[in-house]
Amino acid sequence: MRLEPGDERYVTLDGVLKTPWSLLFMLLFFMRGYAAWIISLTFIEDPNRLLKFFYTSTEQFGLALLVGAPAMLIFVLLTQIKAEMAEWVRQAFRIMPLLLWFSWIVDGALLLSLVSNLWPAFSMVKALLLFGWLMAGWMLLFSRHLKRFNALVVVR
């Protein structure tokens, strides 16, 4: 890995890359469908009833799981970042931006269906989800830390 001036903030004292907070935020945001699924499994009486609180149809729940699948893959890849990485990890990180953009676009379709189901009614939860979605798009476009992190992993 060849560090440039200013890259020391992306690396720990042990020489391991720090995961950007923006990436962790995006992964957690995109994996919220899996969190809802896990929470519903703890509801013993009727897990489907709790899922209907989050999603109005099974298609929306399936779409939420589809949004979270690339994020789950990236999360697994983050666990493989070490001082000495396997070549497959570097190759997989080459497609990380495409996976994040795919999740972002599909999540936009999911949020559109969630908002359009109860259109005139305002919901603070929907507003926060929309704000999180816009922030994730902003970070994908303009986060220098995220882009440099990906470049350091691929080049390493």
Image (cartoon, rainbow, N blue to C red):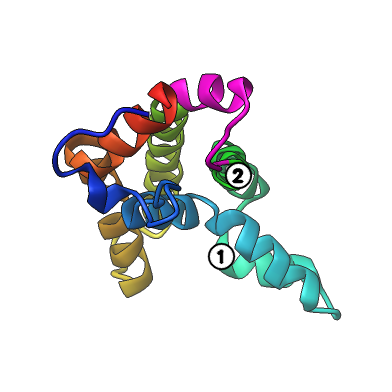
Q: Which residue is mark 2?
A: 72
- The relative height of residue 56 versus residue 148 in the rendered view (above or below) is below
Q: Secondary structure at mark 2?
A: helix
- The relative height of residue 9 versus residue 5 in the rendered view (above or below) is below
Q: Nearer the viewer, residue 104 or 84?
A: 84
- Which residue is most to the front? 14
Residue 150 is left or right of residue 33, and the answer is left
The amino acid pointed to by label 2 is Met
Residue at 85 percent across and 79 percent down: it is 44
Task: Compute the Cα span from label 2 to label 1.
Answer: 20 Å
Residue at 32 percent across and 50 percent down: it is 133
Residue 135 is left or right of residue 34, and the answer is left
For the C terminus, the image quarter is top left
Nearer the camera: disc 2 or disc 1: 2
Q: Position of residue 115 (x, y in %)?
A: 37, 54
For the N terminus, the image quarter is top left
Q: Secondary structure at mark 1?
A: helix
Q: Position of residue 126 (x, y in %)?
A: 35, 64
Q: Nearer the viewer, residue 95 or 34?
A: 95
Dot 2: few (<14), some (14–19), or many (≥20) neighbours within 10 Å? some
Residue 73 is left or right of residue 11, and the answer is right
Q: Position of residue 8 (x, y in %)?
A: 24, 48
Q: Position of residue 33 (x, y in %)?
A: 59, 55
- Residue 7 placement: quadrant: top left
Q: Assess whether mark 1 and mark 2 are in contact (beta carbons under 8 angstroms).
A: no
Q: Is residue 91 visible?
A: yes
Mark nearer the N terminus (2 vs 1): 1
Is residue 71 one of those drawn in magenta?
Answer: no
Q: Is residue 56 visible?
A: no
Mark identifier at residue 54: 1
Q: Which residues are magenta?
A: 81-94
Residue at 62 percent across and 63 percent down: it is 35
